[in-house]
Image (tube, rainbow, N blue to C red):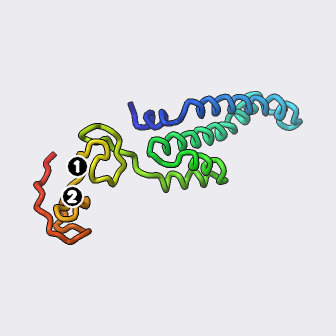
């Protein structure tokens, strides 16, 4: 399965239903009551009228799906999903959605010991205690492989064997 399809699965079913039903309803109502009654647009060919109504309201459906994505993605990342959904809806011109993508947290990664999702930055799994990254032998803070000294206490770190893939 492609990454794009995986990300589409994040959008809740309710958002899909709202987008499709809203899109078809609004576009059909505009076609029936606005385009056919307008003296200029009623002279357009039928294909032009359909393209105008159903093409224009694709933006509406895309906006609903984007807000649904913000809801589902914020929920799976352990963020305040209700707050981010409201911000995405209420801040005009899509700026709320853009802010979400700029400020969102990283995805939790599965623990190698128990496979439970663990937020990034954790040194140990809160579920099973498995070490998720090397730690300083003096202060216990997380360090990265290849560092010579601990950035928290300055202790000389033992040489780590190089990993070969």
Give the side of residue 103 with respect to residue 127, left or right. Answer: right
Q: Secondary structure at mark 1?
A: loop
Residue depicted at 25% across the width and 61% down the height: 141
Judging depth in this view, the residue of 103 and 75 nearest the camera is 75
1 and 2 marks in contact (CB < 8 Å): yes
Q: In the picture provided, is 38 more to the left or to the right than 68?
A: right
Which of the two residues, 14 or 112, is positioned nearer the viewer here? 112
Q: Which residue was labeled with disc 1?
A: 131
User: Label for residue 135?
Assistant: 2
Mark 2 crowdedness (10 Å alpha carbons): few <14, some 14-19, many ≥20: some
* Residue 124 in picture, x, y percent from top left: 27, 50
Quarter residue 12 falls in: top right
Q: Quadrant of the C terminus?
A: top left
Q: Secondary structure at mark 2?
A: loop
Quarter occupied by the N terminus: top left
Residue at x-position 76% and y-position 27%: 46
140, 1: nearer the viewer: 140
Specify whether 90 is left or right of 107.
Answer: right
* Above/below status of 149 relative to 48: below
Provide residue 164's location: percent of width, then percent of height: 13, 48
Query: What crowding class fits label 1: few (fewer than 14 Cα within 10 Å), some (14-19), or many (20 or more)?
Result: some
Residue drawn at the location 57% of the way across and 39% of the way down: 68
- Considering every residue shown, the one lying at the far bottom of the view is 154
Please tell me whether residue 32 is drawn above or below residue 160 in the rendered image: above
């Amino acid at each position: 399965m492609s990454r794009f399809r995986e990300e589409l699965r994040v959008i809740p079913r309710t958002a899909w239903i709202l987008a499709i039903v809203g899109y078809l309803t609004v576009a059909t109502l505009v076609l029936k009551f606005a385009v056919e009654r307008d003296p200029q647009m009623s002279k357009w060919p039928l294909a032009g009228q359909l393209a105008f109504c159903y093409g224009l309201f694709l933006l509406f459906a895309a906006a609903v799906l984007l807000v649904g994505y913000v809801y589902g993605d914020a929920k799976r990342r352990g963020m305040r999903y209700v707050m981010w959904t409201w911000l995405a809806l209420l801040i005009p011109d899509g700026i709320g959605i853009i802010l979400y993508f700029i400020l969102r947290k990283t995805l939790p990664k599965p623990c190698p010991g128990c496979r439970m999702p663990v937020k990034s930055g954790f040194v140990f799994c809160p579920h099973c205690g498995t070490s998720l990254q090397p730690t300083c032998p003096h202060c216990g803070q997380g360090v990265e492989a290849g560092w010579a000294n601990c950035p928290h206490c300055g202790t000389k770190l033992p040489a780590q064997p190089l990993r070969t893939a």
